[in-house]
Amino acid sequence: MSYWTAFILTLFSPVIGGFIYGLERIVRARMQGRVGPPLLQPFYDFFKLMDKRSIIIHSFHAFMGVMYLIGTWFALFVLLSGGDLLIAIFFHVLSLAFLVVGGFSVRSPYSVIGAMRELLHMVAYEPLYVLSAAALYLVTGTFQVSGILRSEHVPLIYLPLLFTAVLFSLPAILKKSPFDTAEAHQEIIGGPEIEYSGKFYEAVYTAKWIEYVYAFFFIFLFAGGNHILGALLIIFAFFFFNLLDNVTARVNFRQMVAFHWYILIPLAVINLMLIALWRS
Amino acid sequence: MVVDEIKVPLREVRRTIKEFYDPKEWHFITVNGVDLGGKVELKWFFTKYGEREYFKVVTSEASYDDEIPTITYLIPSAWISEWELADLFGLNVEGAKRGLFLDPESPQAPLRRG
Amino acid sequence: MKEMLIETIKNLFSKPVTVKYPQEPSPPPPNYRGLIVYKEELCIFCTKCEMVCPPGAIRFTYQEDGSKKFHYNPYLCIYCGECVRACPKPGCLTQVEEIAPPESSVPDWDELEKRAEESKKAFLKAKAVAKKKPGS
Amino acid sequence: MEKIVYSLFLVPWILALAVFLLPGAHFHRLRQLITFLSLPALSFLTYLVWNGHLPLQIETPQWLELAFTVYDYGLLLYFLYQGIKFRDFLVTVLALFQLFLLTWVLLIMPESSVPNFYVDRLSAFMFLIVSTVGTLICIYATKYMEQENLERENRFVAILLWFLGVMNLAVSVNNIEWFFALFETTTLASYILIRFRWDEVSIKNALRALWMNQIGGIAILLGLLFGIKYYGFTHFTQFLSLSGKPVIVMIPLGFLAVSALVKGAQMPFHRWLLGAMVAPTPVSAILHSATMVKIAPYLILRLSPVIKGTLLAKLLIITTGFVFVGAGLLALTQENFKKILAYSTISLLGLMMLTASMGSSMAILASLTLILFHAVVKALLFMEAGVMEKLFKAKYVEDIRRLVERAPITVAFTSIGFMSMTIVPYGIFVSKWMAIEEASNFLSHGAYVGSIIFMATGGVILALLYFKVIGVMTRKRGEFFRFQLERVPFVYLFATVPLVLFVIVGSIFIAKLLSLSVNPVVEAVIGTPASIIAKGLTLITPVSELYGWQIIGAFVLLLIVPILAYFVHFTGTDRVYEYTCGEKLELNIGTYNFFCIQVVEPFVETAAVALFILTLVLGGGLV
Amino acid sequence: MDFRKFRKRSPWILHYNTGSCNGCDIEILACLAPKYDVERFGILNRGNPKQSDILLVTGPVTKRAKERLLRLYFEMPEPKVVVAVGACACSGGVFRHMYNVENGVDKVIPVDVYVPGCAARPEAIIDGIVRALEILKEKGKEVELPHWCSAQVKPPVNRVKLLDRCLEELHGRR
Amino acid sequence: MGKRITVPFGSQHVALPEPVRFVFQTENEKIVDVEVDVGYVHRGIEKACATKFKYMQVGYVVARVCGLCAISHTLGYVTALERLMGVEVPKRALYLRLLVSELDRIHSHLLAMGHTAEVAGYENLFMQTFRHRELVMEMLELLTGNRVQFDFACPGGVNRDLTPEVEKVLREKLKVLEEKALWLRDVYENDFSLTLRWKGTGVVTEEMAKEMNVVGPPARAAGLKTDVRAEFDYLPFKEVGYRMVVLKGGSIYERNLVRALEVLNSIEMCWNILDGLPEGDIKVPVKGLPEGEMFVRIEAPRGELFYYIRGSKKLILDRVRIRVPTFANIPVMKELFVGMDYADVPATVISFDPCLSCTAR
Ligand code: SF4
Ligand code: SF4
Ligand code: SF4
Ligand code: SF4
Ligand code: SF4
Ligand code: SF4
Ligand code: SF4
Ligand code: SF4
């Protein structure tokens, strides 16, 4: 992918992510037998938040919210620009760091708990993503995203278990049930984002849409050079995680970390070792 | 409806309840106060699991400044009724804290007459 | 999870159950306990309704001449229907199915309550004076 | 050239002597000056060595050998004496055993004409760390001790300086017997330093450090013994000649590796390093970061060409990887700030040895980068810990709550230190990244899969740990409207600012740094340099690239932003209180200590012991 | 661009019960459920004052809830509207003149829309919200103060201090 | 204390439609200390019933103690009043009361179940439960003229009769409801993520239940056989096929399962009522003034509701005392929290289906 495409895609990622989010809200509503909001709802929210009077706790906190947006945006660009996959994954950590530090910087219990849980989310899913980077490398022979996208192998064929694991951890990145402990609306009311309002909340809100693009692009990589399959994978993943969201209750953070470490990561490892053995 | 009412003086209340109360059989309902003007009539209501239309009532009278014996150590769940009594009647119940329901700006001891 | 999965997928492909209110009306069912409608022409001003109304949503103010005026506050009424049952004149008070619309201001009921009390007192006083007068 | 190398040992000793001979409060300034001299002097010497013709083999006169033998006996007898004096059974017995082994070794020691000093780039690399970070710590220590105990300052600083010389010596000897002597000298140094405060806990911990390190010494002696027995080898270079050839008996190497594990405070021998906390903070800094524990990865690096790919290496990978994760987990449960640092040192030492044992050139590169940056960052962090302790009376995580309101500079430096250990694009991250990508090449073996998992999970656990602490520090009640930077004494700033600058600049120019400075060391260690290319700021590795703009971007995000945050005030915006469900409450906002992980502590330790024994038995014995 | 029209499209609500009988609260819950599904209008129950536009209050304000109501009110960013749901919130309902209540939300904070009923039907609540949205659209962004409050504020408002003074005044009125 | 985090839960909180305040001290999200404040909703109803309202009005007022089991309060009050004044209520009226009270139980139980699902982060299940709950709401609306506050029972009988048209619609809806209730029972019983999250969480043991005098579904979920419907004959439950549902375990999971099973039993009772509805008057006039004291127990959806009234031949009673189920369950709730995960708190609280408006009156 050239820098320019990457740049344009990144630039418009909030729009894409917004649409995905809008669609998700509709699909979720339909799955629950409701009508749901219009497709453009996220953008309505966006513009409304623009118009609100902003009230903040202190400027550092508010600024961190804005930085979270910029960080996520940058992380997405790193991913899309075709560079190293591992680096892109760690840039994602970096962007989360802003949210976390912002969350910690106020004396609000929900925010602090949420930030802590955000870190625990990271603890849960990050190893899995590092493993998938390694696995994608094994299959395609490169860590470069652009290389993976050009590879004639379809990693999905070699990495079914790993892909399953990544699918199941998708809710952890996007904070959906069953792994939405960091936001846990009914417990900590949005966690680290609770103290943001107005334009500053808007930044956090938009950053989440960008994360959608980030996560789904990651799924896309599993199709390697076969971009049609990639698109199908994204659609599949979209419905899959919405279904999962709708048929599960939230687990607590212990269960979340345990599920990732004891089930998903071993799954990934088995897959990894199998293909490594088969390769050698 | 069978009502088994025992009238005892205030200081006997705890002993009376202790004599028969066994958590396995008895269900403590509540303690209720009725203001009689100057004094309060207190009733401890009990019933028995599995029995039809049966009440056991321990009745006693207390003046506004008497110390009402607590039965919380017998029946751990009784504190809330006792606190309520202390709050709404302004009675002096052993170990009860004020302010369960009432705020500083609410009228105090609202359930007293007059 | 299985049951939910089936249901979720079923829901996804069937029509939502949501009613289209307010685009389409969603009327209350027959005999809904809505607003109290008062017909002054039938009223005998016995004030029974005022007496039974639990929140005091019906109040009468007394005019100088002893006639009474009916006031009703739908934003205070709890729609229990007790006034209708209490009213001795069938048809004077009825409970319709409609409900009052949301408003951005409500009757100043505090003021009205005061007025009702005062006018009643004034009227009773006047009556007492009037009673006394013929006697004296 | 030889003289330069010798002066690298002697200069610190002379300075130490000078400092020692100037006791009392009134010479404080003078001592500071002398200490300060060590920085330019040692750096210059190191510079000369680095630019000299390496590797350098130095023949030594016969008397030196004798002197070392005598010194060895003296040292061991001193240990024995300490054991008896403090009625410590273990120290006594181990000292006796060491004496026995030493005698045996000397009896069967063959004559050899191999030079006893061997200074290659790896040694020079270690000199570099010692002479910069180490001396900075000494300078820092003068101020620190001024605030603690001016009377004993001269002793303290003198020991530190002397220790720098010992370190330099230790990484340049070739003779394993000598190495043993110096290894035990570092043990002695840590013993003296830990018990420096002379209270009960200090002595207890010092004795523990002593006996644990004695085990390391025994392992070296056993390694030497078996080395002589099987191969007739007494020098490192002899072992290195084995590289590439099938190795018949690993026992000597296994023992040497074990001694590295002990010195590197790997579980189950981590307690001595934790115990070192009771000493004044510069001790922790010097022991944990710059110098002493670095002998461990140094030793593994020395051996790695030989053990590369063997079962021993794989076991080492598993063991150290396990420690990397396990120590990280245990660090989460700690509340004492220095203990957190100590555990994370243990953890990262695990990572260094892990990468060192992988043995490929990329892995070695990663290991060296890690050593370099870790030395700098840990020194920085410990110094900041000392600053917090001395200036803000903050020792525990709960004390550092809302520190940012009082001490923005300290918090900023500490945060940079913490972040540099986990996040893109700091040097430590880069080495982790290279290590993971390198490990991906060998995935068909379980140990390497294990290493990836360990690296990935250990990494996030450390991230969790550091952000937890950063979070506690940066919490604040309101605005800094009038922001006052705290007044940090000049010496503290002098010691810390270069480190911070190095971390940042080094990370920005990581590509150049790696290809120009570290890669020659890699070449010296295993013969072939890692195939990395620096193109501007961009670092190109065989399988991937780290772009310059990524590094810059990350730095802009990470560094400029907090500074900006300081100046951005959103003055036109309403301020509001935190949401607390509409209640007005006295809030107590602490942090998680993951207490229940302590439940797994015995398990982690048992597993570590098992792995350790496995390394010893399988790694050493059977292959 | 005029953002005002988007206010109507994405109202997020905060619900606070100041002492109601739950009747109206469960009807608000019912509004979120599939049959009425207020998410059609973009309504989300955020439960977080800082991100909400509409404050739904149910119940006659009890003495203890009063202060909390005020706190939450000041936590909401303008423009915002307050909807009093149910007879209790409008004027005290059946609890009018009981000793521990304040007879309606408008005694404490300004109310924009009153929804009658006991309990208010979901349809009525929807109507009320629709009406509130009309008002919301017209509102300005300046800080709103309770009518009984005498202070002048100048932006930027420090709501921490504002609330303190306000509570003082509130308790002073006691 | 550096590791403690204070977490307020309430008074305003999304998971709570009602104001109640818990202040938890947590360590690693494990609760080590808890403080409860239940007094937010105190309005002074008992006082008002003894000073402000006439005895005929009190029924409407106490209904507003809580909207969730409005009929239970009215029933409690009118039963006590009728017993005190010796009024013989017509059989048809009793059956109609029973019908409404069981429908009310269904709606309240479904609400509790759905709400517990919601706070456990299971939004879809909440939606489905509420979707089917709307059926009951429609039935109640048809039957009584209002969705929540029924004002159905009055001293001497009931206010409205059941017309044949309404009965027909009721039967239709009841049929659908039965189907859905069976499905819901299945979900609440078998759903993996619910069992994972709820089984063994917030356990009230049988001993605890007895000791702390727990009432209602929480008690029955703990294995304590107590149900006022079996212990007090305020309505002819025997005749319409009442069964007591008792489970063992006492965790959130069982509490909701008890509710799901009771819903099924209630539906069955509704069928029997509709089939066997006797003809006759729906109301007898109540004359005279109350004198003396009377107390009754009623099984509200949340458990035992206790009414005590006392009059002295006046239009206004001397004392009306309401002891509500949640009031009785608060002590045990408070005991439960210590040692629990904060993440489980909302579900635990809601699984008791607390009604603070009752508790504080
Ligand atoms: S319906 Fe009830 S509340 Fe309304 S006016 Fe009539 S008696 Fe009063
Ligand atoms: S009860 Fe009927 S007739 Fe009497 S005043 Fe009221 S409305 Fe008029
Ligand atoms: S209703 Fe009957 S009794 Fe009452 S005032 Fe009218 S005529 Fe008289
Ligand atoms: S049990 Fe508690 S302390 Fe232990 S790891 Fe889990 S959350 Fe942390
Ligand atoms: S208006 Fe009626 S239903 Fe609503 S809260 Fe008040 S009493 Fe309850
Ligand atoms: S500060 Fe005073 S004047 Fe201003 S809102 Fe508060 S009470 Fe009113
Ligand atoms: S479950 Fe309880 S708290 Fe929740 S809405 Fe119902 S009554 Fe209120
Ligand atoms: S017991 Fe609870 S649900 Fe029932 S009326 Fe009372 S508050 Fe409402």
Image: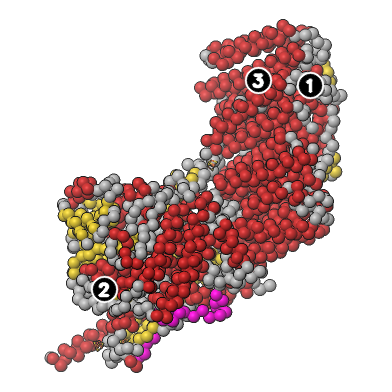
Q: Is residue C26 magenta-colored?
A: yes
> What residue sits 77% from the left and 57% below the top?
A229
Q: Mark 1 points at which residue?
A: D247
As helix, strand or loop, the secondary structure at mark 2 comes to loop
Q: Which one is in front in this view, the residue at disc 2 or the one at disc 1?
A: 2
Asked if residue A77 can be seen in this view, the reply is: no
Q: In this view, does D339 lie above or below F50?
A: above
**Circles 3 and 1: CB atoms closer than 8 Å:** no
Position in image of residue C110 (x %, y %): 36, 77
In the image: residue F49, left or right of residue E80? left
Q: What residue type is labelled 1?
A: Val
Q: Which amino acid does label 2 sit on?
A: Val
**Please, which chain is the residue tagged with disc 2 on?**
F
**Please, which chain is the residue tagged with disc 3 on?**
D
Q: Which mark is residue F89?
A: 2
Position in image of residue A278 (x %, y %): 77, 40
In the image: residue F349, left or right of residue A127? left
> What residue sits 48% from the left and 60% below the top?
F185
Q: Which residue occupies the foreground of this view, F312 or F297?
A: F297
